[in-house]
């Protein structure tokens, strides 16, 4: 079965809430504690998550289970080539009675958005998410509308199906705090999945274990987790190496540095600590940085782009001294 890092024993009421959230999602997604934990870390860090994997391994199910595990509004948007920005954001409609235009919010106005197969829509429609993901608001006809909080985009894409797809540009990828894969389940886990199937499906039985207000409070507490200055310098040395590496034409942006900082705080919080360890930064470097890097075409190999990025990050981690 898959080797996973277990969550530490409960130490506080807040940590007990995190464990309850993890148990709720893991009741649906079997044998994938690592992916579940990173999804929860992204949520508590206030980020967005890109799920990239082969079809049928549970990307959409994970997003559904996480959204159903706390009391929030949820919208699934199936991205297709004919989807328009107004189909996501909303549209102004003329009302005859008042003789005025009124804004009708689209599905983007929810706490958790599942952007299913996000790379199947055009760049114009993809760009409609940029302001929402970065600033938690949208602007329509010179008016700004604040999105509900908490706000999280979980996007899925298939890495091997390229027909009829539009690869996400770097500006879009940079707005995802993490990119993770789920992978095939082990035999025992898959056996559990088969035995637990019901007429309504496993996600239908998920009940909220937290409220939206509790999630917001946990997000605030995550930001109080202590990060030693030596660890900040360690993280920045890793970032600087990505900007100077001869095999890369695009390194990690300051947004990426912030993503690593906040996700490390969230990981420590999820594991019941009020301080970040060097191992937190090392563990998160791949999920947070790999999708942000662009490999120089001169050094391209038969490996996938993301695999090349991960190999370069491993090389950088081996070369940067870890603070004691």
Image (cartoon, grey):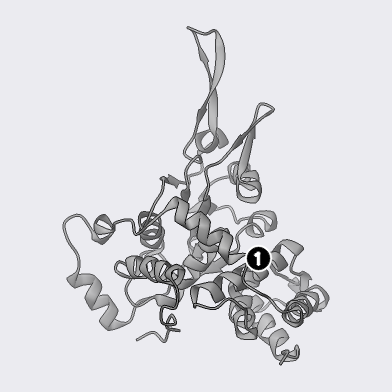
Q: Residue shown at 50%/71% (left/top)?
A: 38
The reply to whether residue 96 is visible in this rendering is yes
The reply to whether residue 163 is visible in this rendering is no
Looking at the image, residue 56 sits to the left or right of residue 193; the answer is right
Q: Report the quarter where the N terminus lies.
A: bottom left
Q: Residue shown at 53%/72% (left/top)?
A: 269
Label 1: element kind: helix
- Quarter of the view holding residue 137: top right
Looking at the image, residue 184 sits to the left or right of residue 135; the answer is left
Q: Residue shown at 56%/16% (left/top)?
A: 101
Q: Residue shown at 64%/72% (left/top)?
A: 290
What residue sits right under mark 1 in the picture? 259
Q: Nearer the viewer, residue 120 or 150?
A: 150
Looking at the image, residue 241 sits to the left or right of residue 105; the answer is right
Residue 194 spot, x, y in % from top left: 21, 71
* Number of dots carrying numbers: 1
Q: Nearer the viewer, residue 308 or 44?
A: 44
- Farthest front residue in view: 12
Q: Report the quarter where the C terminus lies.
A: bottom right
Q: Nearer the viewer, residue 150 or 221?
A: 221
Residue 142 spot, x, y in % from top left: 69, 27
Label 1 environment density (alpha carbons within 10 Å; few <14, some 14–19, many ≥20)? many
Residue 318 spot, x, y in % from top left: 70, 91
Q: Nearer the viewer, residue 48 or 179?
A: 48
Vertical order, 175 against 259 (above or below): above
- Quarter of the view holding residue 267: bottom right
Residue 154 spot, x, y in % from top left: 49, 56
């Amino acid at each position: 079965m898959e080797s996973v890092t277990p969550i530490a024993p409960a130490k506080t009421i807040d940590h007990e809430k995190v464990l309850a959230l993890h148990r709720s999602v893991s009741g649906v997604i079997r044998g994938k504690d690592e992916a579940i934990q990173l999804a929860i870390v992204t949520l508590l860090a206030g980020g967005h998550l890109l799920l990239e994997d082969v079809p049928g391994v549970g990307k959409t199910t994970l997003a559904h289970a996480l959204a159903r595990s706390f009391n929030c509004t949820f919208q699934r948007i199936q991205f297709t080539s004919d989807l328009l920005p107004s189909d996501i954001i909303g549209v102004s409609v003329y009302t005859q009675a008042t003789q005025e235009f009124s804004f009708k919010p689209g599905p983007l106005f929810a706490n958790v958005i599942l952007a299913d197969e996000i790379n199947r829509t055009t760049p114009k429609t993809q760009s409609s998410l940029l302001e929402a993901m970065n600033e938690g608001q949208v602007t329509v006809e010179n008016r700004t509308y604040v999105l509900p909080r908490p706000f999280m985009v979980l996007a899925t894409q298939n890495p091997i199906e390229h027909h009829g797809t539009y690869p996400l540009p770097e500006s879009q990828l940079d707005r995802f705090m993490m990119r993770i894969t789920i992978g095939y389940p082990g035999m025992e886990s898959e056996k559990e999945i088969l035995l637990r199937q019901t007429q309504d499906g496993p996600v239908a039985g998920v009940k909220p274990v937290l409220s939206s207000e509790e999630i917001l409070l946990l997000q605030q507490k995550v930001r109080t987790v202590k990060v030693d200055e030596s660890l900040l310098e360690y993280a920045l040395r890793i970032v600087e190496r990505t900007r100077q590496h001869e095999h890369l034409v695009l390194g990690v942006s300051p947004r990426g540095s912030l993503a690593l900082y906040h996700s490390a705080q969230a990981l420590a919080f999820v594991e019941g600590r009020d301080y970040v360890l060097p191992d937190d930064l090392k563990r998160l470097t791949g999920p947070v940085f790999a999708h942000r890097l662009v490999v120089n075409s001169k050094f391209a190999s038969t490996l996938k782009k993301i695999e090349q990025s991960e190999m370069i990050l491993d090389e950088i981690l081996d070369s940067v001294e870890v603070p004691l």
